[in-house]
Image: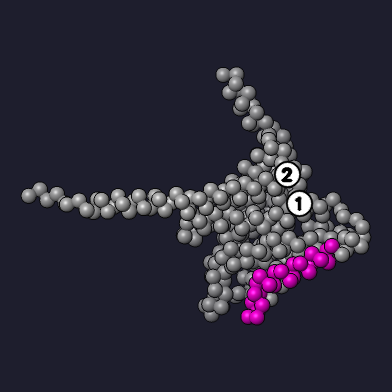
Amino acid sequence: MEFFSELINYLVEPFTYGFIQRAFICALLIGGLSGLVGVYVVLRRMSYIGHGLSYAIFGGAVISYLVRLNVYIGSALWGFLAAMTIIWTGRRRRVGADAAIGIITTASFAVGVIIANATHDFPGDVDAALFGNILTLTNNDLVVVLAASILISIVVFFGYKQLLFTAFDADAAAVFGVRTRLIDAVFSFIVAGLLIAAMQVVGVTMIAASLITPPTIARLLTNNFHRLLIISVLIGAFGGVVGVYASWYLNWATGATIVVTHAALFIVALIYSNVVRPRIMRGKQIADLRVGSRAPETGL
C-alpha cells in the first residue's frame, strides 16, 4: 500500500509546481491548435511552410530587436507578410509554392544572420523564440497563448468551409464566389498567429513538426474530413501534454520532447495503417465470405 502511495506521489509531483501547470496548459492549447491549423496546411500541400516561416520569423525577430520593437509584434508582422508573399508567389503558374517558400524564407533568414553577426549580439528572447523555453512561461504568456487559441479557433470555426474549398481548389473556389485573396490573408494570419503563440512552447524551429505531424497521423487513420479535423486536434493536444510530462522525468528539452512524442505517434499510426488494419480488413473479408458461402436455412 505504501508503494502505491509513493508511486502516486511520484507521478503527480510535476503538477504541484506552478510553472509546470502553465507548461501543461500551454502545450495542450498549442498542440490542439497546431493540429487544427495543420489540417489546412497539409490540404494546401504547403507542409514546408511551417518550417520555412520559422526562418522568416527569425529574420523578423532579429530586426525587431535591432529597432527596439517587441520581438513578438515584429515577428508576427514579418511572418504575416512572408506568408502572404509565399501564397501570392506560389499562385503564379511558373513558380510553385515550394520554390516560393524556399526563396522567401531563406532570404529572410539570411537577413537575420547578417544583422545578428553585424551587431555581435544575440538576445536571449530571440533565442527562446527560436528554440522554445516552455518552463519559463509567465501568466502573461499563458494569457497570450489562450487569447491566440480562442481567436484562431473562432476564425477557423466561422471560415472553415471557405478555407477548405480554397485549400482544395482555389480557382474553382473563386468561380463559386469565394474571396480567395481574403481567405489567403486569413490563412496567413492564422499561420503567423500560431507560430507566434508557439514560440515559447516548442520554438519556431520545431513548430513545423507539431504543425504537420498530427494531421498526417489523422490522415492515416481516416478519410473523413470532420473526423480528420477532430483526430488531428486530439493528437496534437495529447502529444503536447505527454511531451511536457515525459520531459520532466527524462530531463530532456521540452519542445524537442513534444516533437519526438508526435513522431512516435506517427510511427504507431503508420504501422497500424500499413500492417494492422490491412490484416483486420482481410480477416473481415474472409469472415464475410465464410458467412456468405453457407447455405441459407429455409426450414423446408
Q: Is residue 180 magenta?
A: no
Residue 62 appears anywhere in the view:
yes
Q: Position of residue 156 (x, y in %)?
A: 59, 61
> Considering only order in the chain, which callout, 1 or 2, is on the residue closer to the N terminus?
1
**CB-based contact (under 8 Å), mark 2 and mark 1:** yes
Say the numbered circle drawn on residue 183.
none
* SS at circle 2: loop
Residue extending furthest left? Answer: 300
In the image: residue 64, left or right of residue 85 = right
Q: For the residue carrying disc 1, how many other residues have a C-alpha within 10 Å: few (<14), some (14-19), or many (20+)?
A: many
Residue nearest the observer in this picture, 222 or 29: 222
Residue at the spot x=61%, y=58% of the render? 212
Residue 143 appears anywhere in the view:
no
Say the numbered circle drawn on residue 253.
2
Residue at the spot x=79%, y=51% of the render? 128
Span colored in magenta: 90-113
Amino acid type shown at disc 2: Ala
Residue nearest the observer in this picture, 295 or 209: 295
Q: For the residue carrying disc 2, how many other residues have a C-alpha within 10 Å: few (<14), some (14-19), or many (20+)?
A: some
Amino acid type shown at disc 1: Phe
In the image: residue 52, left or right of residue 294 = right
Instruction: Assign the N terminus to one quadrant of the image.
Output: top right
Say the numbered circle drawn on residue 131.
1
